[in-house]
Image: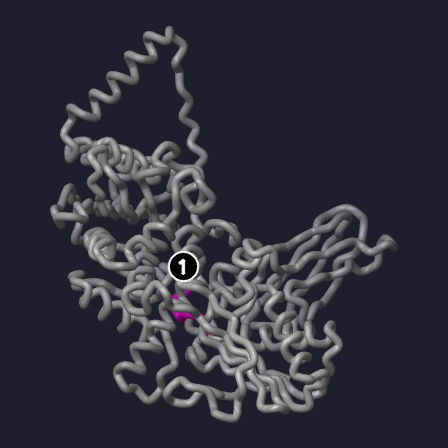
């Protein structure tokens, strides 16, 4: 059986907000503003007319500066930059060149670099092969392999690809696998957890390990049900099904109380306690060895399909130095995830694993291009790649620190101008429209679904939220049809991010109503 992957123990004690996996990783703000229009219809018309007149008469820079000045905490640092994407003109700037922590708006750089370097038609390809005896799974760092959101959109399960692969093996007459299931995740390095990610986040879905082979966002979806007999251990179901996760089940059926799940990050151990009276989904919990999970989930499906397997699960590099497969391996099937799907999960849903896999894949290509002996993608090589790609695109990268691809690390640094500059330069490239489509839309499913309703046709954005940090970057079209690239970052406040998101929304509305 596969050995457990050793996880990096050098971690900083920091903390960020926890957010739901399947849609957004940013906290939704349900604005409580209510209209007090109790007067006549004529009165309402007067108010609307006055508001429109105010937008027109007050200079834009004064209005934005007034919004920034409304920050409730004196020690908060704000950086704002607005650029005209057609002319490059700075429409507004406030500490636009000051390096700050971007949180998830860091993903703007990852999105841009991915499109600029790999191209809009790029696909992540995961291959099933055989040499007549062994079966091979060769990873490409695909974050969308078995992703629940992409699978649901196709009315599939996270293991549907394994059903297809089992059928392909049966078509080849392989009703029994005589050899081993060999997994190759060498497209990426063996550092699965970023050293700067906060210890308190490890084990949670949004800080899942990053591997060359991934499945179900590298998480287990754990659900328990009470047994028929009160007092008996609860029944445990897993997605994906596997025999690797070790459960200590002390949770009993019926009675008072709630079930509790405990998982120590870096281990395969999951402990259940408490009481359970009804079906209880715990939701996603990170699994420390994604490649092993992929292989064992495949083994389970093979067994369900009646394909016997008596061998071992083996790690082995199958790719040659040039990235090609060994000639004795015959490719039976290739699962592909498109760049559009990857960008959409990053931009709309702020899915961290997708961003980190894209960064590491960029690192693998950068290492190969620079003739490095080990071309496995890493956070280090990915950081070099993103900086080089942005510089080549015309972005001034002075002071830019790319620690990771998702913004989960507090070591990331950038300025509002660098974010806006990146979006401006990207808009002028062939992949610019794909990035526009990948960003969150106000009022729709994604990280802006409860913000800025009414701006759906003219605004796309990428949010960013951490403890003491709130950011927003994207595009907005003005009344005259000008497209503006903007970035806003607020660092160093205490308490909730609600006031700062309100300021961001106010500035976006000012820009949308401007000429």
- Is residue 205 shown left or right of residue 496? right
- Is residue 416 shown left or right of residue 130? left
Q: Main secondary structure of the magenta part?
A: loop
Mark 1 closeness class: few <14, some 14–19, many ≥20 residues within 10 Å: some
Q: Position of residue 364 (x, y in %)?
A: 35, 77
**Which image quadrant: the N terminus?**
bottom right
Which residue is drawn at the image coordinates 42% and 68% (left, top)?
A: 123
Q: Compared with residue 394, is residue 23 higher up or lower down, i.e. above or below?
A: above
- Is residue 123 shown left or right of residue 369? right
Q: Nearer the viewer, residue 40 or 483?
A: 483
- Residue at the extreme front of the image, as rendered: 171
Q: Which residue is mark 1?
A: 340
Q: Position of residue 343 (x, y in %)?
A: 39, 58
Q: Position of residue 108 (x, y in %)?
A: 31, 56
Q: Compared with residue 275, is residue 247 higher up or lower down, i.e. above or below?
A: below
Residue 415 seen in the current view? no
Q: Compared with residue 290, is residue 480 higher up or lower down, i.e. above or below?
A: above
Stretch of the chain drawn in magenta: 192-197
Q: Nearer the viewer, residue 254 or 208?
A: 208
Q: Nearer the viewer, residue 308 or 199?
A: 308
């Amino acid at each position: 059986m596969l050995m457990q992957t050793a996880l990096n123990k050098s971690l900083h004690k920091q903390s960020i907000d926890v957010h739901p996996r399947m849609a957004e990783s940013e906290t939704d703000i349900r604005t409580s503003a209510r209209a007090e229009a109790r007067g006549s219809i004529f009165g309402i018309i007067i108010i609307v007319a006055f508001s429109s007149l105010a937008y027109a008469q007050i200079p834009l820079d004064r209005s934005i500066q007034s919004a920034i000045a409304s920050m409730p905490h004196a020690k908060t640092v704000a950086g704002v930059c607005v650029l005209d994407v057609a002319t490059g003109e700075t429409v507004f700037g406030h500490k636009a060149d000051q390096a700050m922590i971007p949180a998830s708006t860091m993903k703007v750089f990852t999105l841009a670099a991915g499109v600029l370097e790999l191209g809009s038609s790029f696909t992540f390809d995961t291959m099933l092969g055989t040499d007549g005896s062994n079966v091979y799974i060769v990873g490409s760092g695909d974050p969308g392999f078995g992703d629940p959101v992409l699978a649901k959109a196709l009315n599939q399960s996270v293991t549907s690809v394994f059903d297809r692969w089992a059928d392909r093996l049966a078509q080849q007459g392989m009703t029994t696998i005589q050899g081993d299931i060999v997994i190759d995740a060498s497209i990426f390095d063996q550092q699965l957890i970023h050293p700067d990610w906060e210890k308190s986040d490890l084990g949670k879905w949004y800080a899942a390990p990053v591997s060359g082979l991934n499945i179900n966002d590298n998480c287990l979806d754990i659900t328990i049900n009470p047994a028929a007999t009160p007092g008996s251990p609860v029944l445990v179901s897993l997605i994906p099904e596997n025999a690797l996760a070790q459960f200590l089940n002390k949770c009993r059926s019926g009675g008072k109380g709630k079930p509790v799940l405990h998982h120590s990050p870096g281990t395969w151990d999951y402990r259940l306690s408490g009481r359970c009276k009804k079906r209880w989904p715990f939701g996603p919990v990170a699994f420390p060895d994604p490649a092993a999970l992929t292989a064992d989930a495949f083994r389970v499906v093979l067994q369900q399909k009646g394909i016997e397997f008596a061998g071992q699960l083996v790690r082995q590099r199958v790719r040659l130095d040039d990235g090609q497969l060994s000639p004795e391996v015959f490719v039976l099937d290739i699962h592909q995830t498109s760049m559009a799907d990857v960008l959409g999960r990053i931009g709309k849903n702020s899915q961290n694993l997708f961003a980190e896999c894209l960064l590491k894949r960029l690192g693998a290509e950068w290492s190969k291009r620079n003739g490095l002996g080990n071309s496995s993608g890493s956070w280090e090589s990915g950081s070099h790649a993103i900086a080089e790609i942005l510089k080549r695109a015309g972005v001034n990268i002075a002071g830019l620190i790319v620690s990771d691809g998702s913004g989960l690390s507090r070591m990331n640094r950038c300025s509002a101008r660098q974010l806006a500059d990146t979006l401006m330069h990207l808009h002028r490239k062939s992949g610019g429209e794909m990035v526009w489509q990948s960003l969150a839309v106000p009022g729709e499913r994604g990280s802006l679904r409860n913000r800025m309703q009414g701006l759906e046709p003219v605004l796309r954005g990428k949010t960013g939220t951490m403890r003491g940090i709130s950011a927003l970057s994207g595009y907005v079209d003005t009344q005259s049809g000008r497209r503006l690239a903007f970035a806003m970052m607020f660092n160093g406040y205490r308490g909730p991010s609600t006031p700062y998101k309100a300021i961001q929304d106010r500035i976006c509305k000012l820009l949308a109503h401007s000429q």
